[in-house]
Image: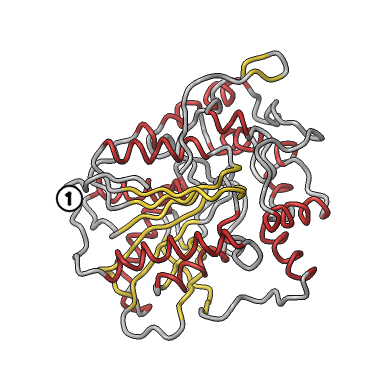
Amino acid sequence: MVAIRFGGYCLMGGAMIASAAMLVAQVPPSAPMPQGQPGIPASGPPASADNQAVVDALKAMGLRPYHTLTPAEARQQPTFTDGVMAVLRQQGKPTTPPPGTTERDISVGGAAGPLHALLIKPTGVHGPVPIILYFHGGGWVIADSKVYAGGARGLARNAKAMVISVDYRRAPEAAFPAQHDDALASYRWVLGHAKSLGGDPSRIAFAGESAGGNLSVATAMLARDAGLPLPRAILSVYPIAGNDLNTPSYQDTSNGPTLSRALMAWFFRYVANSPADLNDPRINLVNANLAGLPPVTIVAAQIDPLRSEGEMLAQRLAAQGVSVERREWPGTTHEFFGADAVIAAAGEAQAWAGQRLHDALYGAASLQPAMGQPQRGERG
């Protein structure tokens, strides 16, 4: 484990970097965020050779700084998954999904209408199977279930559970709280339709990466407050958990190779309707009421501006009586989790997280009732 220290400020270009809420208030709607260091070498510790290979492949594709683009332009950029595919081709390996799962497109109910979702089932698992409701990353602005299918497939294989990866509405076309509303609505839909899909509605877990890691925790909070059954477990992979752009990891990895302070500020700019939105507990999880949530597993990358807030989230969960375990993989960047085809640490992280979900979903404990007794906190 890596000890995390909080506090402090970062000077950039002679001016102090403000909070995300202040930046949203100061920047005109049509302007990109005035942060970012295009042309400056990436900051943070060096990546492992296999992780760096994906980063290099992305650079070779002409990846442009996201914060200089419109959301529509940003969605056309090469993704980390594209980098993984390029490395596989360089290595002479197939780019098709590995064996162990089948998948198809389905439609689920959202807060404002039907949503596309990717249904991934593990092969060789019979009878009503447990369900993982999964939320993809992309800062609530870019990407989709297809881009993040690698991590979802890995969880289906390792947890022996079907995964329903939901394409919630994205900002700015649908700003906050549309994404969180869709996530809760999709959970209601899954509870009502699990059996028709071959799933077990009494054995559900939430999982997600980055923005989706936020949604996995926030949706459990919303389910608790709505009196819905709680999931048996939550997996939050390098989550967006706060709104402070001055944490230690925002400073030591301000220009991270796959996520930067500039890009996070750009995401916040397009997601929020006003600065107040970034203080909402659904976004600012580290200041939320987390009591009564089911056990939480947090996967962290070392080279990630979000590293510190994920550590703080683990501390806040434990302080509020929630069982939590967090592991950080050295030499990995934000986005590594789904790249098990080429990054060894991703396979390790998927196996660890998947086993924890498997244990929760196949255990004897019944689905926790809403507002159940807090679990004893633990940290790894």
Residue at screen point 46% across, 31% down: 277
Q: In the rendered view, does 168 fall on the left or right side of 133?
A: right
Q: Position of residue 233 (x, y in %)?
A: 32, 57
Is residue 132 positioned above or below 80 on the image?
Answer: below
User: In front here: 219 or 257?
Assistant: 257
Name the residue beneath numbered marker 1. Answer: 372
* Residue 49 falls in image quadrant: bottom right
User: In front here: 78 or 330?
Assistant: 330
Residue at screen point 61% across, 42% down: 303
* Residue 57 falls in image quadrant: bottom right
User: In front here: 322 or 116?
Assistant: 322
Q: In the rendered view, does 156 fall on the left or right side of 13?
A: left
Residue at screen point 29% across, 46% down: 378
Q: Position of residue 360 (x, y in %)?
A: 29, 64
Q: How is the image coloured?
A: secondary structure
Q: Position of residue 340 (x, y in %)?
A: 59, 65
Badge 1 element: loop
Report crowding for label 1: few under 14, some 14 to 19, many 20 or more residues within 10 A (C-alpha).
Answer: some
Q: Point out the residue furthest to the top here.
A: 14
Q: Position of residue 262 (x, y in %)?
A: 66, 33
Please name the amino acid that badge 1 sits on. Answer: Gly
Q: In the rendered view, does 179 fall on the left or right side of 339?
A: left
User: In front here: 2 or 225?
Assistant: 2
Numbered circles on residues, count: 1
Residue at screen point 44% across, 71% down: 158
